[in-house]
Image (cartoon, rainbow, N blue to C red):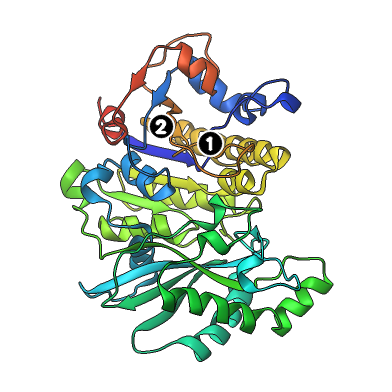
Amino acid sequence: MKYIIVLGDGMADEPIEALGNKTPLAYAHTPVMDRLSSRGEIGMVRTIPEGMKPGSDTANLSVLGYDPRIYYSGRSPLEALSIGIPMKETDIALRCNIVTISEEDAPFEEQTIIDHSSGEISTEDCAVLLEAVRSSLETDLYRFYVGTSYRHCLIWERGEVVELTPPHDILGRVIGDYLPGDTDLREMMRKSYEILASHPINIERKKQGLHPANCCWFWGAGTRPALTSFEEKTGKKGMMISAVDLLKGIAVGAGMKTADVEGANGGLHTNYEGKTEAALKGLLEEGCDFAYIHVEAPDEMGHQGSMEKKVQAIEYLDSRVIKPLTERLDRENTDYRLLVLPDHPTPIRIRTHTGEPVPYLLYDSTAQQDRDWRYNEEEAKRSGNYRPEGHRLIDHLFEV
């Protein structure tokens, strides 16, 4: 028996009037997920424990079976594991987004945050920009490390876990009230804006009508994580397929195999087929019992506020990941159990995460049933299946 989780990050949403009062998941054309739903189980699961902030960090830990109330030590330290940063116990890791803020004739504090991802800037361009920042601002206490696309890391030696605001939570707002209280962090953000606003890459991006990547934004502070081995915990040899450092970092911390897929970038036009092939290779050729396929695109489209692109991302998940994955496993006569779900909602209306329960779909190729179910939020609620502790859902996946 093989076990797979396909996670559409931020896929859950609210009904939208322009979509006929349907959610993007209900509106999208997803014949494969709907077919699997009718032959499997659907329901709702709470992935974010009560009282914790809704984020991909806490939610994906939960989906992987790690209770965030026990294992969560901050978002950026998990990403630091993926990048290969040697964190000391006294180090604090912070996410360093390269964001787009307005360039008005006003003080830095009066600028507005426009885009948390700088138009999904490439890793190559962002590495050049981060080097410009690093060469001017790096010290023995503060060290910058390149991650993926707009997502990078700052290590603060002998620092402290300070309260910081995720940039995707305040899109369209004036930044002054959300800047760090710590003087050094705040000053580095201001100086990064001075360095990057006039950088040749950003001058060229503006000529092309692209968002400039013109400011470092720090958030997600935390200490070095300590995760129990996934194989020791579950008895399953697992692998992670994801474009983002957060998920790769969780995998590294849990001792799981990771796959680097060329062209996987966390955006709408990521390499869906490459991710599917990597999972199949791990399961069928490399002795893995479990594969976790993480697709970031629905979440990114939710942050962008684009219902059309979010629908498209969900349809791509269905047609370019789940369809070829299940067809190949069926063709190989491989028994498998497949769990499909979001980690959290990212509603188009507010363009950030919420902590409400999300719909799940569980399909077992050896135990099919016949129900009139489609996979979406409303029908998952009507099923009557509800799992209040998200970190226990994986145990249900592993039941045979």
> Can you identify the residue that label 1 sits on?
322
Q: Residue 351 placed where, x, y %?
A: 60, 44
Which residue reaches farthest left?
Answer: 232
Q: Residue 324 placed where, x, y %?
A: 55, 38
Q: Quadrant of the C terminus?
A: top left
Residue type, label 1: Ile
Q: Residue 269 placed where, x, y %?
A: 66, 53
Residue 338's disc number: 2
Residue type, label 2: Leu
Name the residue nearer the viewer: 36 or 95.
95
**Is label 2 in a helix, a strand or a loop?**
strand
Label 1 to label 2, Cα distance in Å? Answer: 9 Å
Within 10 Å of disc 1 (Cα), the crowding (few <14, some 14-19, many 20+) is: many
Which residue is rendered at x = 46% and y = 62% of the image? Answer: 260
Name the residue nearer the viewer: 237 or 179.
179
Q: Is residue 231 left or right of residue 181?
A: left
Residue 99's disc number: none
Is residue 66 visible in the rendered image? The answer is no
Name the residue nearer the viewer: 163 or 156.
163
Q: Quadrant of the N terminus?
A: top left
Q: Vertical placement of 263 versus 133: above or below?
A: above
Quadrant position of residue 207: bottom right
